[in-house]
Image (cartoon, rainbow, N blue to C red):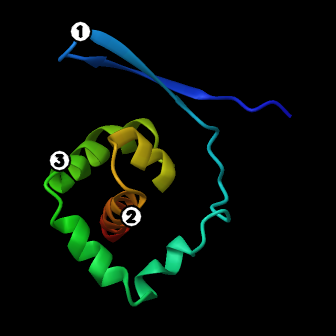
Amino acid sequence: MVDTYKSLSFYNIFNNKTILVILMPSKKSQSHLPYDLNNIETNPLWPILVETVHKMVMYPHHKVYTRDTVLQETPDVTPQELAVRIDTSLGAAIVILKELRQTEHNE
C-alpha cells in the first residue's frame, strides 16, 4: 500500500519565500497516542493543561486560525498535524481541537 502525502504551501511575508509543508498521511486511528482523546477531560491533569494553554500568548490567535482556516480545509485534522501546522505543543493542539469540536457539537 502506498501512502499519499498532503502538502501545503505558505508564503512567508517576512523573507518573501514560499514554505512547503508536507504532512504525513492522516491516520483515522489515534491508537498511537498514550491516552484516549475522547475521555481526556476525566484525567485529573486536564484542568491544569487547559489553564496553561489559555495563558499562552498565541492561544486566541491559534484558536481563531484553527477555526477559520485549518478546520475549513481539513475537518479531520489530528492534534499532531495541528501542532505542526500552527507550531505549538501537542497539548495546546489537543485543547484547541477539543474546545472547537465541543462548540461544533453544541450548536
Kind of residue at badge 1: Asn
Q: Cβ–Cβ below 8 Å for labels 2 and 1?
A: no
Horizontal relation, residue 81 to residue 3: left or right: left
Q: Nearer the viewer, mark 2 or mark 3?
A: 2
**Quadrant of residue 106 within the rendered picture:** bottom left
Task: Estimate how packed mark 2 is, as few (under 14), some (14 to 19) or many (20 or more) residues with alpha carbons within 10 Å.
Answer: some
Q: Nearer the viewer, mark 1 or mark 3?
A: 1
Q: In x, y percent, where is residue 66? A: 31, 46
Q: Cβ–Cβ below 8 Å for labels 1 and 3?
A: no
Report helix, strand or loop for mark 3: helix
The foreground one among 36 and 102 is 36
Q: Residue at x 42, y 47 (%)?
A: 82
Q: Earlier in the sequence, mark 2 or mark 3?
A: 3
Q: Cβ–Cβ below 8 Å for labels 2 and 3?
A: no
Q: In x, y percent, where is residue 81? A: 48, 45
Is residue 58 among the parts visible in the rendering? yes
Task: Please name the residue that numbered disc 1 is placed on.
Answer: 16
Task: Estimate how packed mark 1 is, as few (under 14), some (14 to 19) or many (20 or more) residues with alpha carbons within 10 Å.
Answer: few
Kind of residue at badge 2: Gly
Q: Residue at x 66, y 49 (%)?
A: 27
Q: In x, y percent, where is residue 47? A: 29, 83
Which mark is on residue 41? Answer: none
Separation (CA) of disc 1 from disc 3: 22 Å
Kind of residue at badge 3: His
Task: Please name the residue that numbered disc 2 is placed on.
Answer: 91
**Quadrant of residue 90 within the rendered picture:** bottom left
Q: Is residue 23 above or below residue 84?
A: above
Q: Residue at x 33, y 60 (%)?
A: 92
Is residue 78 among the parts visible in the rendering? no
Horizontal relation, residue 80 to residue 3: left or right: left
Which mark is on residue 61? Answer: 3
Separation (CA) of disc 2 from disc 1: 31 Å
